[in-house]
Amino acid sequence: MIIVMKNSAGQAALDAVEARVHAEGLETRVLPGEHKTVIAVIGTRPPELLQQLERMPHVEATIPISEPFKLAARTDTRERSVIQVGGVEIGNGSVTVMAGPCTVESPDQMAATAQHVASAGAQLLRGGAYKPRSSPYSFQGMGIPGLQLLAEAREATGLPVITEVLDPRQVEFVVDYADVLQIGTRNAQNYPLLCEVGACRKPVLLKRGMGNTIDEWLMCAEYILAAGNPDVMLCERGIRTFETSSRFTLDLNAIPLLRRRTHLPIVVDPSQGTGHWYMVHDMALASVAAGADGIIVEVHPEPETALIDGQQSLSFRHFSELMARLQPMAAALGRPLGAPVGV
């Protein structure tokens, strides 16, 4: 159930509603919005509670939620979430671009890439310090030195940093370097990790598991929200199907479906979703046209020498071309690119 509070509701009114709900042994989460504050109720409510709450003076409406994901669900009266990352707003109607290398390799590679994506108009810098690999013999990332290089790049460019965390034990020190924690496809249903990032106060980008249905994916987001972190973004990055001509099948159907079913911002990763650099431009444009709040793409100074995923990484020239194509299309849709943050 969602309780929509009136604009006049102050803290005392919120406390009174929560106290009434807690008296029934139920949990609450207060979700403030720009215009309305709502209270999500978690647990099985007695039938009479809904009517009792509606009679409280500062309650505007009560809305039963039939979806199994209570906190992630969208309702007619609930605003779409806008997530603040540094000076960047994600989900406010503009298009956010996140860009950088799949993995941090060296100081020169990281500094050059950060400078380029910032000057081209990206708003967040991505880069992997820890990499989940199919083979235990493959490069696993630089670890803490990689996190330090990301922090140095942020200092030099002003771009907030997004990086992947693989293990609940890593969260306590990754949060010292990252502005957004990424949960990758292989960890989308790692419930201890989801609960751990839910307990921290940094935004989370939750990638779709390569075999997850929409409902399973939204329930993964619910774990993070239920643990107390309201700042969750969903990232469509392709699902595994019978098709082998691309690395994954980028499910653009997911974007309008998610916009109907959840208030959470939606990001698309056309690099992972296709596995081919020459498909990234078109799939990025298609994602924005379908309603994505942002895109996250891989960029490398020399993709042919990249330690990981060079075949799907854009060169500097190709990234600049993508930004040049995105700008007029986003503007035509009434959804301009977000304001530049970096140098």
Image (spheres, rainbow, N blue to C red):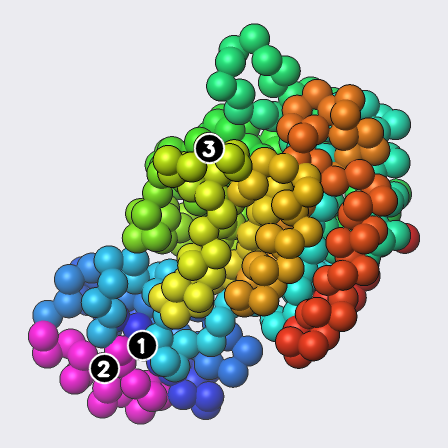
**Mark 3 or mark 2, whichever is nearer to me:** 3
Specify the segment rendered in magenta. Answer: 47-63
- Identify whether 256 is placed above or below 212: below
Residue at 29% across, 58% down: 69
Quick one: label 2, few (<14), some, or many (20+) residues within 10 Å?
A: some
Q: Quadrant for residue 143, please give it.
A: top right
Q: State the residue position of label 3.
A: 244
Sequence-first tag of 2 and 1: 1
- Identify whether 265 is placed above or below 4: above
**Does the image show residue 143?**
no
Looking at the image, residue 261 sits to the left or right of residue 332; the answer is: left
Image coords of residue 336 (percent x, y): 71, 72
Quick one: label 3, few (<14), some, or many (20+) residues within 10 Å?
A: few
Amino acid at circle 1: Ile
Q: Quadrant for residue 175, please give it.
A: top right
Q: State the residue position of label 1.
A: 3
Sequence-first tag of 1 and 3: 1
Q: Which residue ends up furthest to the left in the rendered image? A: 47
- Identify whether 14 is placed above or below 160: below
Amino acid at circle 2: Leu
**Mark 1 or mark 3, whichever is nearer to me:** 3
Image coords of residue 323 (percent x, y): 78, 57
The secondary element bearing badge 1 is classed as: strand
The secondary element bearing badge 3 is classed as: loop
Image coords of residue 327 (percent x, y): 76, 66
**Does the image show residue 58?**
yes
Residue at 52% across, 83% down: 35
